[in-house]
Image (tube, helix red, strand yellow):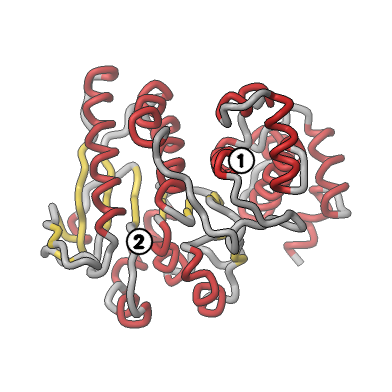
Amino acid sequence: MPIKHVTLYACDNSMGLSLGLTQDVFAFASLLQKNLLGCVIDISVVTLDGEAISSFSGLMVQADCALADVPKTDLVILHGIWGEMDDLLKQQQPLFVKLREWNNAGIPIMAATTASFLLAEAGLLDDRISTTHWHKQKEFAQRYPLVEVRPERFVTATGELYCSAGMNAAMEIMVHLLSKLSCPEIAQKVEDTFLIDFKRGYSSDFISIGQQTYHQDDAILAVQQWLEIHFSESLMLEHLAVRAVMSLRTFKRRFKEATGVTPLNYIQQLRMEQGRELLKHSNKTIAEISWRVGYEDPGHFNRLFKREYGQSPAQWRKQQIK
């Protein structure tokens, strides 16, 4: 089934870059979907009361409808916000009710950069992993102690809740969601058009995972970011090396130098983390979870999980219920 409707939610002090990029991406995807699948994507810019809002830079953004009038939707995008969070969040109380309704209905919700504050304020990130813009990580962690903040992650995905640390990470999520909700061909064309030349730059105080070293190897950072949303796929190191525009030998060496672990170990870390999220927040069987995170053999998943966390998946899940 092709995606039919996307909700782009905006409020005062939303980031203009975030709003403009998502509108362009889905307008382009709509044209592609019409040509390939025969139907457009209906895109609604939504505000709390249906009135225009002023972006962080003062750009006026017109709304298509109010929050209460949003039609049945397939995807919700929350845009980054900037400024004094207390005042901004107090104004958005009706949104939090709607976010919980959408989440209960299984509708994917993506929070671009600081929009993770909106998800957390709605209580949807409690006891879940999340990330946000690195300039707001400390404030986010202090405000939401029940959220497992992962400052080293570009992307977090828990259930149908997606958070990004930056706009190029948000682009990776949008490409992934288009592949999932529309079709892989459309997602690939969007990636080729918007993401391939998107500048990947990060501050050195942001990149760290476990005991890994800080680094600013942009090519490796780009692969890390891509892996955080594609880790469950069948992956070959040769293909990752091609993404990094390196020989396989150079890629493996630079990845280890930059991160402190091999590419395979990095993929395993991501899969184990997502497996833990699914054990905690879903009723899926261990075999289903194994498949969802990229392992066809549940026994292999069990062994790796026990090595990582000291317990089998079944034991770990049982402990969380206590």
Look at label 2 and name its amino acid. Answer: Gly
Please identify the quarter of the rendering in which residue 235 is found.
top right
Q: Could you tell me which residue is drawn at 22 percent across and 23 percent down? A: 34
Q: Residues within 10 Å of mark 1 (few under 14, many from 20)?
A: many
Regarding residue 129, the answer to whether it shows in the image is no
**Is 177 in front, or is 151?**
151
Of the numbered discs in the image, which one, if any, rests on residue 80? 2
Q: Could you tell me which residue is drawn at 40 percent across and 51 percent down? A: 167
At which x and y percent is residue 57? 21, 66
Look at label 1 and name its amino acid. Answer: Ile
> Spatial distance from mark 2 to mark 1, Cα to Cα?
26 Å
Q: Secondary structure at mark 1?
A: helix
For marks 2 and 1, the one nearer the N-term is 2
At which x and y percent is residue 262? 77, 39
At which x and y percent is residue 186? 35, 25
Q: Could you tell me which residue is drawn at 88 percent across and 54 percent down? A: 310
Q: Residues within 10 Å of mark 2 (few under 14, many from 20)?
A: many
**Is 124 in front, or is 81?**
81
Please identify the quarter of the rendering in which residue 30 is found.
top left
Q: Relative to residue 25, is residue 137 drawn left or right?
A: right
Number of numbered discs: 2
Q: Could you tell me which residue is drawn at 33 percent across and 70 percent down? A: 82
Q: Relative to residue 182, is residue 21 drawn left or right?
A: left
Q: Relative to residue 118, is residue 257 drawn left or right?
A: right
Look at the picture and state if 7 lies above or below 118: above
At which x and y percent is residue 147? 58, 68
Of the numbered discs in the image, which one, if any, rests on residue 220? 1
Q: Quadrant of the N terminus?
A: top left
